[in-house]
Image (cartoon, rainbow, N blue to C red):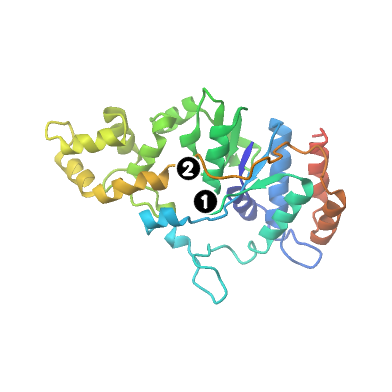
Amino acid sequence: MLLDTASLYFRAYFGVPESMKAPDGTPVNAVRGLLDFISRLVADHRPDQLVACWDDDWRPQFRVDAIPSYKAHRVAEEVEGDAPDTEEVPDTLSPQVPVIEEVLAAFGIARVGSPGFEADDVIGTFATQSLLPVDIVTGDRDLFQLVDDKRGVRVLYPVKGVGVVDVMDEAAVLAKYAVPASSYADFATLRGDASDGLPGVKGIGEKTAAQLIAEFGDLAGVRAAAEDPASSLTPARRRNIVAAADYLDVAPGVVQVVRDVPVPPGLDLALPRAPRDPAAVDALAARWGLNTSVQRLVAVLAGGS
């Protein structure tokens, strides 16, 4: 099981009331929510291995170099002392992220990132290399491109918390978007994604992108049709695709998940059956008021519900 960790702790932050606070009054709603999510996922799916995949770089330079607008609207206004391109994160969420790191480490849950890459790319690498079936837990539709029935790779897309999920296998992706999972990246390139700062092709939304992929096979086929006067494309659609040539030259390298990022060798990815450092878990639970969530996760890891 591969967790898109930031996707989940953002979901927890906005889904759990800020009234969940540590003894010193610090909000810990994202921490508690993420721990409860992990407990529910483990109880429901019982993975042999669990990886909290991490954004070592939430806005990688290679993607920005290709499309400068990539996630540009999420960059926080620069404050002295901030690193360049700091992600805009709610003031009461930022302090919770280091706590999440500490708690995961104390439990012995693998947390893996790769310098210069997003969690999506770490997920893509593990999903591609795994010898086991893979469940990816994410609210990011871009990861539908990794779905592969032959390799047992599917996405658990949260609908309500993580207790209710859409299980996205190849049939589900095809039913929802009218494109095969293997073509999802091409489909997303044509459609664009305002939430990631990707403009897409003018006049091409979700339905039209799916129709074009169905008719011409893939992005290369669509572009070839735009250059072919005898193709069935309307003049307006042909003009828009040709006009988007500069975008279409580089967008696939932004949209496509990297599947071979460097990750540390010899990682222990096994789901722990008990906390690696029980004293540290107890100390963190006491300091941050996490007792209920911690006890629940300890019980689930030991085989409870």
Q: Residue at x 72, y 61 (%)?
A: 19
State whether residue 151 is above or below residue 251: above
x, y percentage for residue 3? Answer: 62, 42
State whether residue 164 is above or below residue 31: above
Is 299 left or right of 206, judged from the image as shown?
A: right
* Crowd tier of the residue under label 2, counting other residues whose Cα lies within 10 Å: few below 14, some 14–19, many 20 or above: some
Asked whether residue 270 is in view, the answer is: yes
x, y percentage for residue 185? Answer: 40, 39
In the foreground, 296 or 249: 249
Is 74 left or right of 157, judged from the image as shown?
A: left
x, y percentage for residue 170? Answer: 48, 27
Which label was assigned to residue 258?
2
Is 144 left or right of 94, judged from the image as shown?
A: left
Which label was assigned to residue 26?
none
* Quadrant occupied by the C terminus: top right
Q: Residue at x 83, y 36 (%)?
A: 302
Callouts 1 and 2 close, C-beta under 8 Å:
yes
**Residue at the front extreme of this rendering:** 265
In the foreground, 196 or 305: 196
* Quadrant occupied by the N terminus: top right
Residue corresponding to mark 1: 117
